[in-house]
């Protein structure tokens, strides 16, 4: 596969961009894990986000193929193995019949499978090995989202997700994501958003404000769930998340216009709620 270099976003001279609306697609993607890791490295992105798939999780994927005309259920687990019951399903007239086919054991460390039916053991091992070695479009999408969580921000522009506004300050990072997707067979669509159009400015403000408001709501919900058994490091992580969101609100102030004051109030409320929880749990306040 020959990867094409990302094309620069071009607009008229002197046009100021608010950012870009982006959407990516990985239809029917099947890429070797080693290729994905190399693509991340070539795009100057963290290859550690493409973690190896544990045998137990790979076997769950393999079951989608292996479950044709059979039911597969986990029945036992210990420190090193998982045991599954394979039950064949057949239909006789207006009735379904179920017959114990075999018991299969998966080694959670090595990924080897064993069962009394040699042909089924071979099929299961081949499919398991394939699932460990290959990543699909959903895996790549999760990796892209994780990279954005770490290094940039995605603001959904529709309730179902899949299409996002990204502030202009992250343009170089989008270039890297585009290079990654090009290398693994996906694609990235990019639509520059110029400043100075009434509907464009309004839509960007709404997307950024709604995205940050949702994050603040998550903070408040998390704090509301804290109780006497909440660990001190959990409380500190909550405080750090609130601090991080406060920084984002300041960083994206140019996009927020009249919404910033509302977000500042909501964050102040989240801070107060966290302090009250800490006092209730530990008897001493924390500075959020």
Image: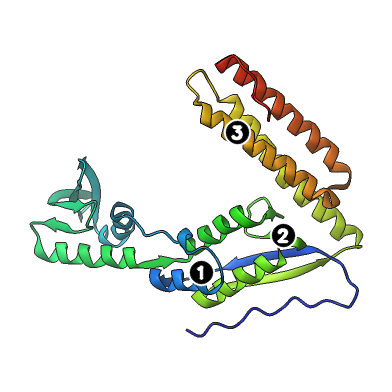
* Direction from residue 151 to residue 249 in the image, left or right: right
Residue at 57%, 35% in the rendered image:
237
Q: Which mark is residue 40?
A: 1
- The mark found on residue 245 in the picture is none
Instruction: List the single residue furthest toward the bottom.
Output: 2
For label 2, count other residues whose C-alpha is less than 10 Å away and answer few (under 14), some (14-19) or many (20+). Answer: many
* Residue 33 versus residue 94 in the image, above or below: below
Residue receiving disc 2: 166
**For the view shown, which residue lies furthest in the left direction?**
116
Visible residue check, residue 72: yes
> Mark 3 sits on what residue?
238
Earlier sequence position, callout 2 versus callout 3:
2
Instruction: Please say if the residues under marks 3 and 1 sit with CB atoms less than 8 Å apart.
Output: no
Q: Quadrant of residue 195?
A: bottom right
SS for dot 2: strand
Task: Measuring from the top left, give residue 153's x and y in whole percent.
Answer: 67, 54
Q: CA distance from mark 2 to mark 1?
A: 20 Å
Relative image position of residue 93 (x, y in whole percent): 20, 54
Residue at the image point whose x is 87% and y is 67% from the top:
16
Q: Residue 77, how many percent across, how many down?
A: 21, 41
- Regarding residue 92, the answer to whether it shows in the image is no
Left or right: 92, with 10 as reference point: left
Q: Quadrant of the C terminus?
A: top right
User: Which one is in front, 52 or 135?
Assistant: 52
Q: For marks 2 and 3, give the CA distance.
A: 25 Å
Q: Is residue 202 left or right of residue 52?
A: right
State the image quarter where residue 280 is shown. top right
Q: Secondary structure at mark 1?
A: helix
* Residue drawn 42% across the image and 74% down it: 35
**For discs 2 and 1, the disc positioned in front in the rendered view:** 1
């Amino acid at each position: 596969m020959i990867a094409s270099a990302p094309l620069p976003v071009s607009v008229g001279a002197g046009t100021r961009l608010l950012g870009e609306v982006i959407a990516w697609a990985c239809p029917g993607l099947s890429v070797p894990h080693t290729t994905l890791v190399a693509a991340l490295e070539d795009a100057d992105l963290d290859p550690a986000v493409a973690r190896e798939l544990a045998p137990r999780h790979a076997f769950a994927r393999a079951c989608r193929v292996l479950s044709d005309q059979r039911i597969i259920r986990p029945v036992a687990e210990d420190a090193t193995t998982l045991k599954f019951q394979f039950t064949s399903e057949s239909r006789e007239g207006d009735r379904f019949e179920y017959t114990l086919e075999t018991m299969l054991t998966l080694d959670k460390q090595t990924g080897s499978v064993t069962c009394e039916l040699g042909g089924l053991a071979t099929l299961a091992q081949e499919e398991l090995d394939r699932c460990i070695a290959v990543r699909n479009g959903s895996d790549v999408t999760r990796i892209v989202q994780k990279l954005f969580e770490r290094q940039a921000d995605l603001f959904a522009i529709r309730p179902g997700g899949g299409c996002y506004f990204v502030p202009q300050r992250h343009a170089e990072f989008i270039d890297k994501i585009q290079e990654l997707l090009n290398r693994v067979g996906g694609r990235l669509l990019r639509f520059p958003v110029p400043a100075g159009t009434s509907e464009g400015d309004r839509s960007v403000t709404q997307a950024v404000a709604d995205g940050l408001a949702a994050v603040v709501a998550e903070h408040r919900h998390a704090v509301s769930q804290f109780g006497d058994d909440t660990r001190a490091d959990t409380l500190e992580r909550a405080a750090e998340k609130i601090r991080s969101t406060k920084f984002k609100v300041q960083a994206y102030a140019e996009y927020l216009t009249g919404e910033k004051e509302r977000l500042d109030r909501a964050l102040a409320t989240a801070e107060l709620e966290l302090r009250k929880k800490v006092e209730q749990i530990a008897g001493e306040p924390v500075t959020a």
